[in-house]
Image: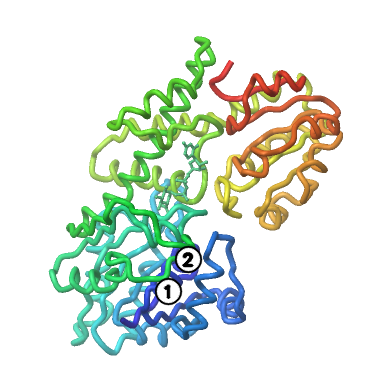
Amino acid sequence: MRLSVIGCGYVGLVTGACLAEAGHDVMCTDIDAARIAQLNAGGVPIYEEHLEEVLASARKAGRISYTTDTGEAIRFGDAIFICVGTPPREDGSADLSAIDHVAQQIAGEARSSKLVVEKSTVPARTGIELRRALSAYSRGGNISFSVVSNPEFLREGTAVFDFFHPDRIVIGVDDESAAQKMREIYGPILEHKFRCPVHKGPCPAEPKTEFLVTTINSAELIKHASNSFLALKISYANVVADLCEKLDGNVEQVTHAMGLDPRIGGQFLKAGLGFGGFCFPKDIQAFIQLASTVGVDFEILKAAERVNKERIDRFLGKVNKALWVVKGKRIAVLGLAFKANTDDIRFAPAIDVIKRLLEEGAQVHASDPEAVEKTKKVLPTVTFHADPYETVRDAHAALVCTEWAAFKNLDWERAGKLMARKLVVDGRNLYSPKKMADLGFEYYSFGRS
Ligand code: UGA
């Protein structure tokens, strides 16, 4: 099928590339001309495992193209995937102006009927508004638009894997033929008819992907309810960690045992610096905001959000207590991205931690396998290093903010010899307190005495 993708951010890039790799002809567009030029030149604007390979293969097969001409892209596809940003407004609600703008463009540029697929994360009822907008902007013309909500559940860092091996594909529609077309689009994935870029041999047997057809409002709610629940789970684990610190428990023992109960599940119970990124912090706020507009007080989510914000204070509290005076100290920060395997620093806890350290007069040296270039632009006074051992050299403390394998496997015996003081404050519980103590470190982490 011919597909268009509007918006070449992380979701648009992965969606376009994977659908092309699955056998569709895809044309992508973005208002950022530099990004389109980079893509046309064979570049990949973000770091995402396997994406470069998928893009190269789709390009070689002639299945993917890029243009700055939105009209051309709109006319190309039978289905148009809207993947534009929905950033938070001042009050936490989602800014939907980019979606509205795209609706105007689709209505103005389309010359044939289109399936309009809402892929951006949006509050419930956006699809209904989008349908109304498309009809209003096309001024009663005879081109019909069918709106579909198709939320994405891609995790940054494993997005290509998630796209080809989803546990569910959710399709919110109000007419059966739109659901049928979406089934065709996702057919190669549901029937496993694609060359998997992740697994070199056959893909491991996995639970069958559920293809769920719901109403548009339900599909939109599924996305926000899922992300918010995961965020809630993390905050719950973090409060349990705080309790473990007070009562001499070990949060890892507690959450491991909890997670063995299949009703709870072991994922997203890792205590530490809390959640960041461009999804959880903004989605939880948008969900709270949406609930309040219809008179529902989502108190439980407000608490989860508050707990998460306080993680930075608790982390810096540990740093301050250990260092006594922060001003003038050389501090090494290991990890800048909001999580491992991405170069994304949006709402990354590490960035807040560094800003606060700089305010207190510390000299910050930092390192990250992928996120240094992006961080240089927002924190120009930090000294960056490619090598983590150079980062900790002469440092009075090393702070671990992201769970990269390179940091998990660091040789602390070697690192300790380079440091001015053997002090590690670990925001991701990467190391064994006993091993660190045996190596002569003062070591602090979350929820483990
Ligand atoms: C999240 C969801 O997991 C995806 O399903 C969803 O599609 C995506 O948002 C989105 O809405 O686009 P992502 O933001 O890439 O994906 O990151 P996660 O892997 O979910 O991690 C979010 C944050 O929670 C990270 O900062 C991570 O370090 C933190 N986290 C995660 C914890 O602090 N503890 C945990 O146990 C798990």
Quadrant into which the C terminus falls: top right
- Return the x and y of residue 381 as percentages of the image width and height: 79, 47
257 vs 297, left or right, is right
Give the residue drawn at x 35%, y 87%.
75
Q: Provide the residue designation for mark 2.
A: 197
Query: Which residue is nearer to you in this view: 386 or 114?
Result: 386
Q: Nearer the viewer, residue 363 or 166?
A: 166
Return the residue found at the far left.
Answer: 176
The residue sitting at 43% across, 81% down in the picture is 27
Q: CA distance from mark 1 to mark 2?
A: 9 Å
Amino acid tagged 1: Glu
Task: Identify which residue is drawn at 50% across, 71% down.
Answer: 54
Q: Which mark is residue 21?
A: 1
Q: Residues within 10 Å of mark 2 (few under 14, many from 20)?
A: some
Q: Name which quarter of the figure residue 424 lies in.
A: top right
Residue 447: percent from left, percent from top: 54, 21
**Discs 1, 2 touching: Cβ within 8 Å:** yes
Along the line of sight, which residue is nearer the eye, 185 or 192? Answer: 192
SS class, disc 1: helix
**Looking at the picture, does residue 84 appear above or below residue 269?**
below
